[in-house]
Amino acid sequence: MVEDQIDLGKKLIDMLAETGFDVTAAFWVKASEEGSWFLYIASEAVDRLGLAAAYREVYRVFKSAPYEWDLLSEMKLIGKDNPITRDVLEIRNRFANRMGTRSRRPQLGNLAIDEVYIYPPAEAEKLWPRQFFEVTYYRQGDTNTWRAVTKRSKLYRGMKAKGVVAYSTARWEGQKEGSEKFATVSVLLEVDPRFDEANVFIHPNVWEVMTHQARTMADEAFKTHHPDAVIEHGDYED
């Protein structure tokens, strides 16, 4: 077990935790029969989603990682209630160490091992998904009445930002500030993690409430630039 493996594994664990993926325990195991080190990640996601779906979630995080991951063939996922997980948690709780815990006990669950390195509990903040809304305002002729169109777009994961995140506009050469014909406000709303599950039905009323919330936040930001604007909300685009 080399330090590079430990450091790379820690980066992956932190990324998983930041995206809301449960990491009950993470540890490197050198199994007696295989003779090689494998990174085990124990997660309730395996029990809840099934092994294949849990692997897909981890691979999704891998794809967005700013690192060259070589761990795909060295990683194994197991459930929270797996006997191996229970033994690892018992070791971690007994020999708590912020730098990680090593043990040469001969067995974890029903797996014969030579050695195990156990990471301390992940401390990263678990971030809920963020739903992106974009509200675009169009000036009606030369008046101070603006028509607003709201668009719901991508669901982002692993983001800390929320609320109004951007205001953008444009002016023709020679136009004065405040005379713009359009402007766009971008909003990120924190949502329940279940929004990230494809098989969960989201009631239309929930989207209506969220859209109203996004519009309210966007209007407040827009009026810091156009305090006397009269806003008429129109179309909604999905």
Image: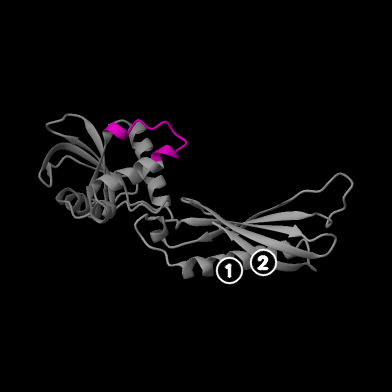
Residue highlighted by disc 1: 212
Q: Which residue is drawn at 32% across and 49% down?
A: 120
The amino acid marked with disc number 1 is His
Q: How crowded is mark 1: few (under 14 residues within 10 Å), some or many (20 or more)?
A: few
Q: What residue range appears in magenta?
A: 62-73
Query: Looking at the rendering, which quadrant does residue 212 occupy?
Result: bottom right
- Which image quadrant: the C terminus? bottom right
Q: Which residue is drawn at 84% across and 64% down?
A: 143
Pick the residue in front: 55 or 207.
Answer: 207
The amino acid marked with disc number 2 is His
Q: Is residue 131 magenta?
A: no
Q: Which residue is drawn at 42% across and 64% down?
A: 202
Considering every residue shown, the one lying at the far right of the view is: 174
Residue highlighted by disc 2: 233
Helix, strand or loop at mark 2: strand
Distance of mark 2 from mark 1, alpha carbons? 10 Å
**Pair 2/1: label in front:** 2
- Which image quadrant: the N terminus? top left
